[in-house]
Image (cartoon, helix red, strand yellow):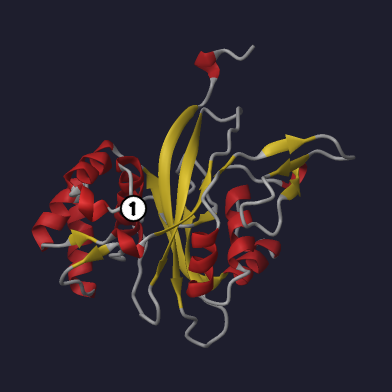
Amino acid sequence: MTDESQKPESIPAATIIIFRDCPEGGPPEVLMTVRSRNMTFASGMAVFPGGRVDPEDFALAERVEPHSRGDLSLDEAAHQIAAVRETLEETGLALGLKGAIDAERAGEARQLLHEKKTLAPVLDAFNWVLDLDQIVPFARWFPKNEKLSRVYDTRFYLANLGTGDVEVSTDEAENTRLFWVSAQGALGMAEKGEIKLIFPTRRNLERLALFASFEEARAQAEAIPVKTIIPRIDTSGEQPMLTIMQDAGYPITAELLETVARG
């Protein structure tokens, strides 16, 4: 019997997979960040921008009029707000927001967010409002690794910059590098040892590599209901495999356990 006190802490988190059209043509690119080696989770790994959901994100979700949230529950709205907040903080991109937004104001808003640590005063200061229709639910991963003291229950979203040529910069705290790359290009970088990927990021990149455009990715995301993916170890074969469900849109659903990077 498992001692309840020994179970890892479950932390709600959210991340946005940001698309842009490739400047040279070809497959769309996504924005990735390399996490600082000082971070407890996924240190030194290439991931998508994001982080934990804070109590203030729930408070802001409660401020949003129910009709403005549409079909979103309070919990889902808080996760999407966290994704918006973390994206602005980590990259300088103002996504999921509307109002008078340009590069200069986004930079000022990012600085205010660093000072206030929460999104509500930024919206008030710049007269912005949330536009969560820009955010598309894509996946939810909950890797219950008993070896970790805490695990992240992470919701993944999609958003699109289109042809926008937008400057991004690291926050010099949580991440040390930001770069645009196609999903297949990121997988190639990992194979060459240029970046390191944890299991959920690798599986998501493989799924993203299926799409020739943001519209294709959005269409699949809207066609397949988001299910909570809990990787499990399968020991029925010659070697243990880490597996995920077959019907969540992922082309590869298993990896040798010994090769898996799990954060």
Residue under the image location 52 percent in, 26 percent down: 8
Image position, residue 136 (x, y; %): 42, 60
Of the pair 214 and 3, the residue shown nearer to us: 214
Marks counted in the figure total: 1
- Residue 259 appearing in the image: yes
SS class, disc 1? helix
- Residue 196 appearing in the image: no
Image position, residue 3 (x, y; %): 57, 12
In the picture, measured across the screen, residue 85 lies left or right of residue 29, that is: left
In the picture, measured across the screen, residue 243 lies left or right of residue 207, that is: right
Residue type, numbered disc 1: Glu
Residue to which mark 1 is pinned:
86
Q: Hey, which residue is sitting farthest right in the picture?
A: 238
Residue under the image location 48 percent in, 39 percent down: 153
Indicate the quadrant containing the C terminus: top left, top right, bottom left or bottom right. Answer: top right
Q: Hey, which residue is sitting farthest bottom in the picture?
A: 24
In the picture, measured across the screen, residue 249 lies left or right of residue 108, that is: right
Residue 107 image-quadrant placement: bottom left
State whether residue 73 is above or below residue 124.
above
Pointer 1 local density, CA inside 10 Å: few below 14, some 14–19, many at least 20: many
Image position, residue 16 (x, y; %): 42, 58
Image position, residue 22 (x, y; %): 50, 81
Indicate the quadrant containing the N terminus: top left, top right, bottom left or bottom right. Answer: top right
Of the pair 193 and 139, the residue shown nearer to us: 139
